[in-house]
Image (cartoon, rainbow, N blue to C red):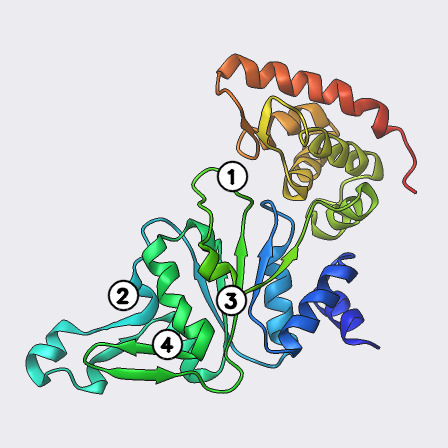
Amino acid sequence: MSTLQILQDQHHIVGRARELTSLLACVRAERHVLLEGPVGVGKTAIARAVAEALGRGLVRVDGDGRYSEARLVGQFDPPMVLERGYVPEAFRAGPLVRAMQEGAVLLLNELNRMPEGVQNVLLPALDEGLVYVPHYGAVRAAPGFLVLATQNPAEFVATADLSEALLDRFELVRLDYQGADEEAQIVRQEARCAPSEEIIREAVAIARATRGDSRIRRGASVRAAVAIADLAAQLDGDVSRAAELALPTRIELMEERSGDLQALLDELKKKSSPMSSATPR
């Protein structure tokens, strides 16, 4: 069995053969990788699976606008510094230093939500496998250190473009939404309430109908389809009611008006209903 098949089987990854093959090629060549795609397409799961396939530890960081350079690199423990000074034992390694010292994979989730200063700290680590910490000294990466980062497309709220200097240190693997058949397979696999095939098809159709609509800034991922299917299974098959519960937190309108959302949901359900009777390919 190939590494690709092992990854798909052991980590329950549906499809994604091209993306996994590309990612495996990059990491085997010891290249840092940026995975780009909308929310819910499996970026983090795929990165985690590949790290495990490499047999390396994984250090994960979830990015947000408040994440600081000190938190990423590490900092000294103030009480110990007062007592003993800037001794190595007083330093508390952050995720970056820890991954470098262990030769592990550093997973930076939603890198483009992090402040620019935090992004800049990564440059010497990506370039030379080196980070300098004041009062502690130089930290050199052990063999095996690798960075896998994920980012949402630039049109997502609270994201910023990465600098050219940072992008130049990464290879890019893009993940988009999968086809209807693969999304239905994901719902079958992830749903907890044993929804019927009809419910699964309707849930997938509704989630897919939210994408590409000019009134919707961010459409629903397959996670929404899983939620709709599970809820419908608990609501005697009422997919419409399930969608009303699941979609408001998973789509973002171009203009936020409370009345617009309900009207749009009603329209999406009508638009997707012809698809619900189609037999999966």
Mark 1 and mark 2 lie on one chain; the one further toward the N terminus is: 2
Mark pair 1, 4: CA separation: 30 Å
Mark 4 and mark 3 lie on one chain; the one further toward the N terminus is: 4
Mark pair 4, 2: CA separation: 11 Å
* 216 to 7, vertically: above or below: above
Mark 3 and mark 1 lie on one chain; the one further toward the N terminus is: 1
Query: Which mark's residue is nearer the viewer, 3 or 1?
Result: 3
Query: Which mark's residue is nearer the viewer, 3 or 2?
Result: 3
Where disc 4 sits, the SS reads helix
> Camera-side residue: 87 or 159?
159
- Residue kind at label 4, given as amino acid type: Val
Which residue, given by chain and number where applicable, does mark 4 sit on? 97
Mark 3 and mark 2 lie on one chain; the one further toward the N terminus is: 2
* 271 to 198, vertically: above or below: above
Residue 146's x, y, as percent?
Answer: 52, 75
Residue at 79% across, 44% down: 179
* 200 to 255, vertically: above or below: below
> Camera-side residue: 46 or 125?
125
Which residue, given by chain and number where applicable, does mark 2 sit on? 70
Which residue, given by chain and number where applicable, does mark 1 sit on? 156
Residue 262's x, y, as percent?
Answer: 59, 17
Which residue, given by chain and number where applicable, does mark 3 sit on? 169
> Camera-side residue: 9 or 71?
71
Mark 1 and mark 4 lie on one chain; the one further toward the N terminus is: 4
Residue at 60% across, 21% down: 215
203 sits left or right of 50 in the view = right
Where disc 2 sits, the SS reads helix
Residue at 46% across, 37% down: 157
Q: Residue 225 appears in which quarter of the rendering?
A: top right
